[in-house]
Amino acid sequence: MKNSPAHLWLLLLVMLLHSCGDNPQKNNTTGDVLLLEQVRLIDGNGGTPVEDTKLLIKDGKITAIGSDITDENATVINLEGKTIMPALISAHSHIGTLKGTTTKAENYTEGNILAQLKKYESYGVLQIMAMGTDRPLLFETGLRDRSLKGEIPGARIHSAGYGFGTPNGAPPLGFAMDKVFRPATAAQVVLQVDSLAQLKPDMVKIWVDDFNGKYAAKMQPEIYKAIIQEAHKKNLPVAAHVYYLNDLKQLVADGVDIIAHSVRSDVIDDSTITQMKAKQVIYIPTLSLDEYAYIYGQQPEWINNEFFKRSLEPGVYEMITAEKYRNDLKNAPNYASNMKAFETAKQNLLQLFKAGVLIAMGTDSGATPVRAQGFSEHLELQLMTEAGLTPLEAITVATKNAATALKIQQQYGTLEPAKVADLVILNSDPSKDIKNTREIFAVYKNGKEVSKGPLP
């Protein structure tokens, strides 16, 4: 029997009432509008955390922050007792060549890259700069571009493309560095920078180091000066792998933009610090790299922590906890010098920070199996506080400052209205103890929950 008009009208009315309900803050099935309430907010700007506030998120962006926000279309999530901070940003990482206990060119596959981007994401790291060790696949498949557009899951990958090293020198070919440009003369630089620029990299990476005397020569000043000049013509900043103070001095004089590792040979003098600040040179300390150089010869307090173990590639935990591995590290001729270098690195970080040089977080994670992707970024926060920064200062370095280093600060790095809602929800307050950044409750990317963290 056909429904009467009156019956159809009644049915429609019932459906409308059911869809609207009687709760003005009902769940929004699209998930486009979220109201996170009763949160402790660390916004990344370095100020005192704001207690018991709300964040309104629409279409992936923060639209309002305050205690008196309402929105009848929002999904309301009560986060009483939890802390929200910006997602972490690593301005110096590597991706794709690491797999298991090896770092090889054949490991560089789309599947491996995607898995590592997801791992970073689960640790609350939503932007990484791959610092000069990428391969053609990243650009030829459009993977880098798809990542930045948010078309694939995981951390967004920025790239320095193929870096610049030295013939028969740094960086070591054995670590999938065969795509690195290695100019023998300054005359070769123009065409090589032109070639790199076709990939539209975010920056140019150069290695100026002999790896503690492993190589006979470092990149010569006339070559890296030519690289800096050609890169600047194309509006590309230059980041330098550096170890020695004398190299830092020359690089700053020649216009380098970013120091991608700590100076570890000597304490940086006041005159050089003044020049770095005047020229707005950014400094990425990578303290975790320096601790990894010797720490597995000891028994670090986090070695058996699941938060650490889940960041490792298969087989790495067994490798680093083997007695032979530990003994080989402790008996290596550079064991004591590596420990000293780490202490010098911490001292240089603190004095540069106090002097007002912009410090950005980077870790060199993913360059070798022992530099764990995801965990390294949380360890870096801890080590920065051990060097003398407060927890809130370290968080700013790892969010706002790192975004500035990657030139994405207009959209990312702090939690403010009009910025993208990339954030980490924590069970505990990291302003009281920086290790609380490891107490991940959820990770949000573009205003949507993408992970509950690396632990079950």
Image (spheres, helix red, strand yellow):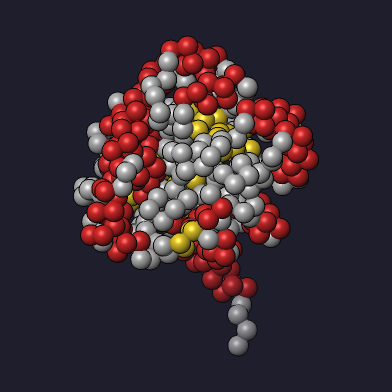
Q: Residue at x 38, y 21 (%)?
A: 267
- The spot of residue 149 in percent (x, y) is 63, 50
- The spot of residue 81 in percent (x, y) is 26, 42
| Res. 250 in view | yes
- The spot of residue 108 in percent (x, y) is 57, 61
| Res. 442 in view | no
Q: Residue at x 61, y 41 (%)?
A: 166
340 lies left or right of 424: left
Q: Nearer the viewer, residue 44 or 448?
A: 44
Q: Nearer the viewer, residue 126 or 387?
A: 387
Q: Residue at x 42, y 20 (%)?
A: 268
- The spot of residue 240 in percent (x, y) is 56, 34
Q: Please determine whether, in this image, residue 95 is positioned above or below residue 9.
A: above
109 lies left or right of 43: right
Q: Residue at x 38, y 66 (%)?
A: 314
Total labels drawn: 0
Quadrant of residue 387 within the rendered picture = top left
Q: Nearer the viewer, residue 84 or 440?
A: 440
Quadrant of residue 52 within the rendered picture = top left
Please identify the residue farthest to the front as the structure is shown.
216
Q: Quadrant of the C terminus?
A: bottom left
Q: Quadrant of the N terminus?
A: bottom right
